[in-house]
């Protein structure tokens, strides 16, 4: 007869709390729905509890909403992408 009891840490997900750094590193993936269910839930729990991280999350959410809204309404001007790339290259160069 086999013992069907699970060893600690087997067969269930650990509910380790994320650090602020871990949660904020996943904010864009969280907002874009790109995290697995467990990671999504861990980030959500952290953001609900953390007074320091929530304002960062809220800003990123509003920023992405604004970018999506602008993208749906307006096309970028010709040559804008090239100018942005040049500026970025000059900054990192």
Image (cartoon, rainbow, N blue to C red):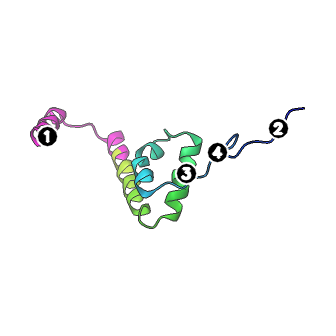
The residue carrying pointer 1 sits among few (fewer than 14), some (14 to 19) or many (20 or more) residues within 10 Å by Cα, namely: few
Q: What range of the chain is rendered magenta?
A: 68-93
Sequence-first disc among 1 and 3: 3
Judge left or right: residue 45 versus residue 68.
right
Residue marked by disc 2: 4
Q: CA distance from mark 2 to mark 4?
A: 18 Å
Judge left or right: residue 41 versus residue 69.
right
What x and y, as percent, mark residue 37? 59, 42
Reply above or below: 25 against 49: above
Any mark on residue 92, and which? 1
Residue marked by disc 4: 13
| Residues tagged 2 and 4 counted as in contact (Cβ below 8 A) | no
Sequence-first disc among 4 and 1: 4
For image coordinates 29% across by 40% down, the residue present is: 74
Q: CA distance from mark 4 to mark 1?
A: 42 Å
Reply above or below: 54 against 88: below
What x and y, as percent, mark residue 14? 62, 48
What x and y, as percent, mark residue 70? 32, 45
Q: CA distance from mark 1 to mark 2?
A: 58 Å
Residue marked by disc 3: 42
The residue carrying pointer 3 sits among few (fewer than 14), some (14 to 19) or many (20 or more) residues within 10 Å by Cα, namely: some
Say which of marks 1 and 2 sits in front: 2
Q: Secondary structure at mark 4?
A: loop
Say which of marks 4 and 1 sits in front: 4
Sequence-first disc among 3 and 4: 4
Image quarter (top left, top right, bottom left or bottom right) of the N terminus = top right
Quadrant assignment, res 21:
bottom left
Labels in figure, total: 4
Q: Main secondary structure of the magenta part?
A: helix
Between 66 and 73, the one nearer to me in the picture: 66
Q: Secondary structure at mark 2?
A: loop
Any mark on residue 1, and which? none
């Amino acid at each position: 007869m086999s013992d069907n009891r699970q060893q600690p840490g087997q067969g269930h997900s650990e509910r380790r709390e994320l650090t602020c750094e871990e949660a904020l590193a996943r904010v864009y993936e969280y907002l874009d729905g790109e995290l697995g269910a467990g990671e999504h839930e861990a980030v959500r729990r952290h953001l609900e509890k953390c007074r320091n991280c929530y304002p960062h999350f809220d800003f990123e959410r509003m920023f992405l909403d604004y970018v999506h809204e602008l993208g749906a309404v307006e096309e970028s001007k010709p040559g804008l992408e090239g100018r942005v790339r040049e500026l970025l290259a000059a900054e990192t160069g």
